[in-house]
Image (cartoon, coloured by chain):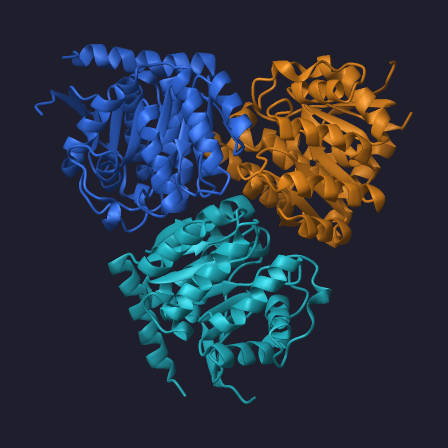
Chain colours: A cyan, B orange, C blue
Amino acid sequence: MMNKEDTKNQMIQAVETVRKTNPMAGSITNTVTVNFVANAQLAVGGSAAMVYLPDEGEFLAKVGGATYINVGTLLPIYEQTLPHVAKVLHDTGKPWVLDPVAVGIGSLRTNLLRKFKEYKPIVIRGNASEIIALAGLWGMEGGTDISNVRGVDSTDSVRTAKAAAVALARWTGGAVAVSGKTDLITDGSVMAYSHGGSHFMEKITGAGCSLGGVVTVYATAASPFIAALTATAVYNLAGTRAENKADGPGSFQIQFLDELYKATASDIANNPFEMEEVNL
Amino acid sequence: MMNKEDTKNQMIQAVETVRKTNPMAGSITNTVTVNFVANAQLAVGGSAAMVYLPDEGEFLAKVGGATYINVGTLLPIYEQTLPHVAKVLHDTGKPWVLDPVAVGIGSLRTNLLRKFKEYKPIVIRGNASEIIALAGLWGMEGGTDISNVRGVDSTDSVRTAKAAAVALARWTGGAVAVSGKTDLITDGSVMAYSHGGSHFMEKITGAGCSLGGVVTVYATAASPFIAALTATAVYNLAGTRAENKADGPGSFQIQFLDELYKATASDIANNPFEMEEVNL
Amino acid sequence: MMNKEDTKNQMIQAVETVRKTNPMAGSITNTVTVNFVANAQLAVGGSAAMVYLPDEGEFLAKVGGATYINVGTLLPIYEQTLPHVAKVLHDTGKPWVLDPVAVGIGSLRTNLLRKFKEYKPIVIRGNASEIIALAGLWGMEGGTDISNVRGVDSTDSVRTAKAAAVALARWTGGAVAVSGKTDLITDGSVMAYSHGGSHFMEKITGAGCSLGGVVTVYATAASPFIAALTATAVYNLAGTRAENKADGPGSFQIQFLDELYKATASDIANNPFEMEEVNL
């Protein structure tokens, strides 16, 4: 199993490489939180660009170091754009990150997410309910059917998504990050638990979406597991620090962006986490 | 007529029920202020989800406690989505809130807003010009034709919208909230005037849109009149408090979200308002 | 050549006229930064409205004092909306401002930007790479082909865009603003260099987009050159002031909006700039 010190060193390297190289991470993401996604990506040192059209998505997929696909607010054109871009990413071996927001709502969302199975996103990030439902949609262990989703919020706890996360990670050969009180990150053989964050993260829209965007930035410079763990760590760290200064969810969001920007590589790597081997 | 103390008690109950139950209030709303709408809904204790496609809107209409339709920035798909979702809401007896932003601009907007007459939103929220123009479009007393709109800003004062607001509320059997210096809320038989707010609310985009979103959250837990009055009260309270701490419109918006979050049920119910019987 | 004192007096007049008349400046702009564009326009004293549909764009073009077209995140409907609205603006002699964001990405963007040559935006605002690429697309001096764009960030310095900016300004009969460390504004015969700003402006999304929106607000009340110079000056001033108070990019953006709102006409006119005659 990967050593914890090695892991920390790789996290430090991911953070520093991103700050040094300002890598381009294109996104096709929802309209609700698109601004926050971009600002979070910039705050950690990445460069952001968002598009909707098929050929524009293909362009970003090819020039970017990694690409983010978040299915939050589907528009009709996504029916053409998303499978096309996901295929380009897969065929060119480019890393991409999937946030299966609100899996289970509507037929287009279900069809798109089903198709993504073959295009293998290297990181999948979601809350427990989304990870369990996606595993169900992909016919995997730990999954359940998608008929009990309520919306964008999780009704399951992170630990219940463990088997689903491992199954998804083993299928893609990448990593899965499950967001919750304690966050779980796995590559199918190692399981990390990352601590911190803030209760305010459920009181602002886009904490999850923008985490997916930041995972994508780190995925330009690190393995899927390290990218997911590093992004989760900086989110937990910045969340804890921002809560200490915030007077409510409005000021929390502002402080949070500031703390994303100010967090040092060493602070991020030393944000509390544990690792264990997967016994499934 | 409803007693003022009873009214306050119902407002307190609405605020507390929302904070306890975190009700889902789906929205189909504009891209300019969608993030602020969601953050305001979360700040008062609701849960937010935004979509564009017909079957996704139908899903949210059915699982949500209430639904918000704001016609701010129409996209082509809205031609299918909005009448479909409004019909589902009407046929299933689910409460929904309409913000007829910029009524009078463009043919699709006019057609959609005309159709909504039969689907009876239980709260209509707008500025005076929008309420007067919608009443005109629906062929009601107090309305004028829609040809003199300038954009999204009101050119009429709240009091001039009184007859239109009463006529609309009587038609829908719900309530109408007219935003302005003093806000007017009516269910067709009672008229309430709510005070407070801030001059900065016209210096940020989305004060009105997000108020509609918050009305929708309270509409999951209270009558249309109480939902509209409670949302208006917390907006006026948070506006006044935020202005005291703000140094400009940027910091005002942040403080405003914090104050929405911090306002107690009792503070909200005790924000100044008067009630009178409608004599029209 | 225009005298520097005359220039300052015209800047002061532009700022004061806008604050006094609250002019309507409609926009068709991207979904990433649309909220920031609107809030910046409101902060300087304008009124904002955003649309996507052809007849709604035509409406805003006709009732607004000036219109902003930013091609950041194209949607399919833009293929109909943008040429139609640009033609209406041109045919009615109404001023409009173009931000050719990410020129070079995708075929629709290229086709739209090529068409805009005949509709002559009175101000074009972009980073150096975008200005050079647009001049190339329009077959003008100083331009290069569009195949070397990376995304939304500039890979060229402002000074390298000088010839392109002059050529574009001479063609439109308006002005061109090139954003960078030192900003360049030209009407084809005079060249102004505006100083200030902040390194944080590259760490938030929408500094450029919202500058285009604010240019549009001033274009309702001043010549293209004065509008571009005034907007650039208030951005540089507010950027410098906001950086002094900010703790990171989150708080910078909030302070920036506050400073846009608080800047006096005289402060704006006295923000450092130089002027010289164009010798090309």
State the image coordinates of residue B178 (x, y, percent, origin top left): 71, 24
Q: Is residue C115 above or below residue C230?
A: below
- The quarter of the image holding the N terminus of chain B is top right
Residue A88, quarter of picture: bottom left
Residue A159, quarter of picture: bottom right
Q: Is residue A109 above or below residue B170?
A: below
- The quarter of the image holding the C terminus of chain B is top right
State the image coordinates of residue B265 (x, y, percent, origin top left): 73, 41
* In the foreground, A84 or A129: A84
* In the foreground, B225 or C228: C228
Residue B232, quarter of picture: top right
Q: How many marks?
A: 0
Q: Is residue B271 above or below residue A102?
A: above
In the image, is B127 to the left or to the right of C51?
right
Inspect this view and state whether residue B66 appears.
Answer: yes
Residue, far right: B1
Residue, far left: C279
In the image, is A42 to the left or to the right of B82?
left
State the image coordinates of residue B130 (x, y, percent, origin top left): 67, 22
State the image coordinates of residue A40 (x, y, percent, origin top left): 42, 53
Residue at position x 38%, y 20% in the image:
C90
* In the foreground, A204 or A144: A144
Residue at position x 86%, y 25% in the image:
B170
In the image, is A222 to the left or to the right of C273?
right
Residue at position x 35%, y 75% in the image:
A8
Inspect this view and state whether residue B217 appears.
Answer: no
